[in-house]
Amino acid sequence: MRLHIGYVPLCDAAPLIAAHAFGFARAEGLDLDLSPEPSWATLRDRLALGHLDAAQMLAPLALASGLGLSGPPADLAVPLGLNLNGNAVTVTNALWEAMAPEGEDLDAVARALGRVARARAETGRPLTLGTVHPFSCHTYQLRLLAERGGFDIARTRLVVVPPQHSVEALERGLVDGFCAGAPWNGVAVAAGLGRVVALGRDLAPDAPEKVLAVSRRRDGATLPLVRAVARAGQWCAEPDNRAELAHCLARRSYLDLDAELIGRTLAGDLTVGAARRRVPDYIRFGAAAQVPRADHLRWLLAQMRAAGQVPTGPDIEPMAAALYRPDILAEALPEGGA
């Protein structure tokens, strides 16, 4: 059975890429055509319109698409999480110098960013911050960073920049900073273009990041696909497989980036501010990330409400809960593993 699967070039596409590259899909009788998409909006629309059978998707965007809050209404289900964490906020070197935080801890950095953001807003030159899509944990993490720093995110310019273009936007001065997923923050730092000021896992620990969204039009393919991607995700979580995974992701047909940089990113070997840090849970794959959990759903809906993205009226939680399908994962992997 041949399936068309969409993804955006990011480390957290690893379970889909591994399912394709290392035989997990073929073992389930599936041939996967992986389609790198230029933006999350394009991926959302192609899934809704039937051009894709399934996709790596931002967890909030999957809900918004299924609820008809973003793009064409989509008949989809979310049977599998792909990863937890993986985002970071990076700013230009000039903004980092203007911030001059008094310490390396998150509160000190957030206060410094808040001071500059308020000053810029008062002079009519608000900070421009990039996010990958309005319905994303990236947007919510920028809001949480603003709250922590005591500034109003509404007094900045939030612009949408696809993650694979975030480094170019920083280099060209189109944004003062961005929140994006791995490995693009590390790419910016390695190129000497900016500093990481906050990790998503510190702003919202173990936030659900990407999920597998599947079209209900291909229900017969759902169980083998979920089984293949779940097993691939568990393989990705094993430290002994990290080097092989990094070299796979680095291929031109996938992320087309330096394998050593990707390996450091997967290992959580990061430079945050001016300090080198080891953050093992910077991005998490495997069984702990895979169950579509009710508490994750509630957290996402709370963030969507706080951002003014949920219309007033009847409670949408029951409709959202119908999109999250842990029962499909349980049927695909009744013992929770390979």
Image: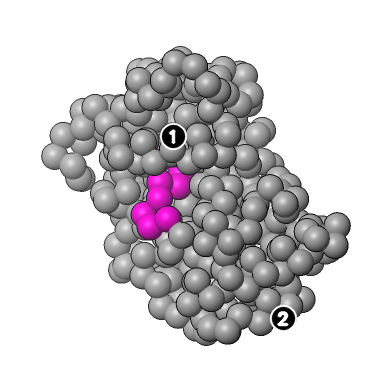
Which quadrant: the N terminus? top left
Amino acid type, residue under disc 2 in the picture: Glu
Check disc 2: other Cα within 10 Å, few if <14, some if 14-19, many if 20+.
Answer: few
Nearer the observer, 46 or 167: 167
Measured as percent of width and height from the top left, residue 100 is found at 66, 82
Residue position for label 1: 301
Q: What's the CA distance linking mark 1 and mark 2?
A: 36 Å
Image coordinates of residue 110 in percent, x first then y, are 57, 68
Q: Locate the C terminus and report the quarter of the image it occupies.
A: top left
Report the residue marked by disc 2.
97
The magenta stretch is 204-211
Query: In this view of the protein, which residue sits in the foreground, 7 or 326?
Result: 326
Specify the amino acid type for callout 1. Answer: Leu
Residue 157 % position (x, y): 75, 50
Q: Is residue 91 magenta?
A: no
Q: Residue at x 35, y 28 (%)?
A: 324
